[in-house]
Amino acid sequence: MKLKNILAAGVVLSFTALPLFAQEVDVTPPNEEIGYIFTTFMFLVTGFLVMWMGAGFSMLEAGLVRQKNVTMQLMKNVALFSIAAIMYYLIGYNLMYPGDGWSIDGVLGAFAFTSLEPVGGSADTDLTYASVGSDFFFQLMFCATTASIVSGTLAERIKLWPFLIFTVILTALIYPIQASWKWGGGFLDANFGFLDFAGSTVVHSVGGWAALAGALILGPRIGKYKDGKTVPMPGSNLTLATLGTFILWLGWFGFNGGSQLYMDTAGNVADISRIFANTNTAAAGGAIAALILTQLLYKKPDLTMVLNGALAGLVSITAEPLTPSLGAATLIGAVGGILVVLAVPLLDKLKIDDVVGAIPVHLVCGIWGTIAVVLTNGDATLGGQLISIIIVGVFVFVVSAIVWFILNAVMGIRASEEDEIMGLDVSELGMEAYPEFSKS
């Protein structure tokens, strides 16, 4: 009986002490940390979404190239993402966001490795923004996206290693330097009032200019242009291309939504939801515009144009996804869809071979989207937008062309005629994506 009384008293004491123990392990953060926590979390989640765009580019390109070059496109996309991750850590991040450490004020950032906060943070942590790790991770994904744009344009005839060397230079130097001029607080931001919310110019047109320089030096695929006519070269798998487009569409919510940069107030959260809605409707506007226009021009709708129309709408709204109404966002995206349908045959007339249509989507619509900012954002000026487009375009195109020329002179960037006809999967990699369907 005595033992039972002791046990009962112990149970009562245990339950009585629970509130005390709960108080001791309460880890509710103070108010000043909550905004820091939410913004950090936002960067991580939206960064995951933008990373998933790598799968989208891979599937889109795999579907739009011919069967004999599918493995090469998959290899390039995995490799370029990995190169971007390392080069952005070694050089790119601090070159793009130098703070007070500019090498040339407003023009050239800092040369230093990326360093994260100590484990568990520190007393010096800036609680008004987000963790360095989350910001680095999020911004890295934009850098990798730029390189993915180049991959599709130059498909089916560029050798692997010259492309990867160019990717090193693009992700370590070209992209971060010009991005610092706007997002790092450089001279385009300070002197011209340049507005580019999530990168119609800073990301998409940069990839487009680099791709254009490469395409001009590389030349078209064998047999693409004959007797003044463009010879169609259908892709291997429109199912994969469609899947890739939807993955990119999904990833774009992170691309634009995360560019709000803060999730620490109700107002910021409301703006993020507005950005999501505008991003989605712009893509829809681009797809529908391409659908209708291809029906009118070619008497049959063209799926590849509709897919690129959706992407065109997304690129077009990226420079300013916050201020438009849903109607305005739809129209901005629709103009992008129209531009793609018109730009693709124009490039063919100029004999510029862009396998996946990346130049019309990312360069042409990147320019359009940057100009369209003035339609809904009163802080933007047409002059400031145009001069910034020109400065970034000239810098990226000229530097990219120089790099391509040097690579071509030193090691050659184009596969041999025999290798191109055989397909780069076998000639460069020794493996095929669909070996059971290969001809014996």
Image: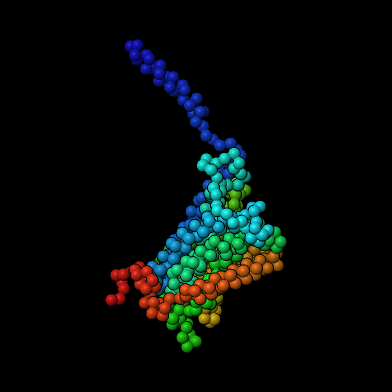
Check the image and report above or below for 376 versus 9: below
Pinpoint residue 392: horizontal percent, then vertical percent: 62, 67
Q: Residue furthest top?
A: 2
Vertical arrangement, residue 321 with respect to residue 357, above or below: above
Coordinates of residue 67 in the picture (x, y in percent): 37, 72
Q: What residue lies at 55% left-to-right and 52% top-to-bottom?
A: 114
Which quarter of the figure is the N terminus placed in? top left
Question: In the image, is 397 to the left or to the right of 378?
Answer: left
User: Residue, x 49% and y 28% (percent of image)?
Assistant: 22
* Whether residue 284 is visible: no
Q: Compared with residue 34, is residue 257 higher up or lower down, i.e. above or below?
A: below
- Choose top left, top right, bottom left or bottom right for residue 170: bottom right
Q: Residue at x 38, y 79 (%)?
A: 418
Label count reads 0
Q: Residue at x 55, y 76 (%)?
A: 342
Is 399 or 267 nearer to us in this picture? Answer: 399
